[in-house]
Amino acid sequence: MKKAIAALIAFLFFLMFVNILNSDSEEFKGIPKFGEVNLTERVSNKYISKSVSGDSGEIVYGKTENAESGSANMVTSIVVNYRSFDTLGEVTVLFLAATGVAILIGGGQRKSLAISVNPIVKISARIIATLLLAFGAYVFIHGHLTPGGGFPGGTIIAAGTLLMLVADDKKRTSKLLKILEGTMGFLYVVIGIAGLLVTGSFLKNFLPTGTMGNLFSAGLIPIIYSVIGLKVGAELSALLDDFFAEEGRK
Amino acid sequence: MIQYFSIMLIAIGIYGLLSQKNLVKLIVSLNIMELGVNIFIISIGYVADGKVPILSPIVNKSSMNFVDPLPQALVLTAIVIGVGVTALALSLVLKVKESYGTIELDEIRGDNA
């Protein structure tokens, strides 16, 4: 009976959302039809042509110099340049979640595995974890040129940590991770305040943006994304370690 | 079509949140709902035959036909927050299991109906 009511409510929600979806008409502007989006009337058009604070002409990969935002990856230019303040809040939320997990279940001794792990698995886990660390660093350093960035890069690093934690039940993450995490969060705010002092806006880019498509371009974006990558990697690694801590035993 | 699919995922999530009594299943429902919302937000930014919004040696001019990068940036935020919420919720479930010995909501309340 309860399940039937739940199903009914869910179905009503479905109908409601579908009605909202089909409500786009001449007199009432709703959600546009799938694929029929007019980007020229959206703010994203300014982000794509990098002309928020004035028209800078067409952006060409490998040629344009000193564009407003030098990142070839437009999602990155939104995440850590135009809406960097948003990302600072996001990083704060992740920090709060990791701290909450550490308060709730962290601090215990390492949970021992029920099965014994073969030495071959342990050694190959070390090799793969090293590769994952290098790949994570690659992903967040190239965040302004390729798909990826600080959050995926940090998650890849945390995946390496998870592999080590699963393969060897003696392993713990270092206590220095918390210090690294805090330092990186502090550094993000310091970069923001430096932008405030140099340009007058919090987190605004004050470095030259260089030629679009080069590794050393886009001003602050690679620096901030490296900071975020290290922070997210350290945070998620410590979080995974908390889940491997045993209840009660200190 | 993909928009109907994402709305269906949201509805499945709502059904799960309303009908399930297992705390882990509730978290899974929450994640399904979040997935539906994320797919829906990305689908709002889709432009027919649009390219990935990353300039590269092949897609090299900003005047080309790109999909909307703004919903993708927002979904990146939403995914990260979803990870944080899920981790916090799972650690709360661990604490509930520790003090009640069960993660079924009706057994915690005491009525074994």
Image (cartoon, coloured by chain):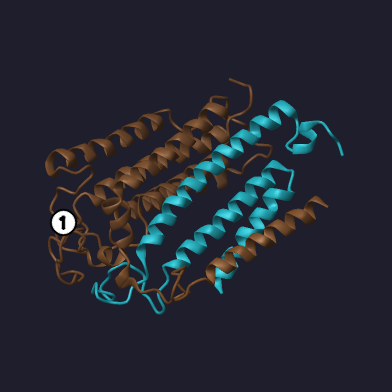
Which residue position is annotated with label 1? Answer: A209
* Residue A123 in view in this figure: no
> Please, what secondary structure does the residue beneath circle 1 have?
loop
Q: Quadrant for residue A22, please give it.
A: bottom right
Q: Residue placed farthest to the front in the image?
A: A27
What's the residue type where badge 1 is placed? Thr
Report the side of A42 relative to A152 (left or right). Answer: left
Residue at 48% x, 42% y: name it: A161
Q: Which chain is brown?
A: A
Q: Position of residue A10 (x, y in %)?
A: 68, 58
Give residue B41's position: percent from left, percent from top.
Answer: 47, 62
* Residue A103 place in picture, x, y as percent: 52, 26
Residue drawn at x 30%, y 56% is: A78
Q: Check the residue under mark 1 and report the chain it is in.
A: A
The image shows residue A34 at horizontal and vertical percentages of 48, 74
Of A149 and A44, the residue lying toward us: A44
In the rendered image, the quadrant that contains the C terminus of chain A is top right
Q: In this orientation, which residue lies closer to the viewer: A113 or A212?
A: A212
Visual hue assigned to chain B: cyan
Q: Is B30 displayed left or right of A72 in the figure?
A: right
Judge by depth and name the residue closer to the eye, A19 or A116. Answer: A19
Q: Which residue lies furthest to the top in this view?
A: A250
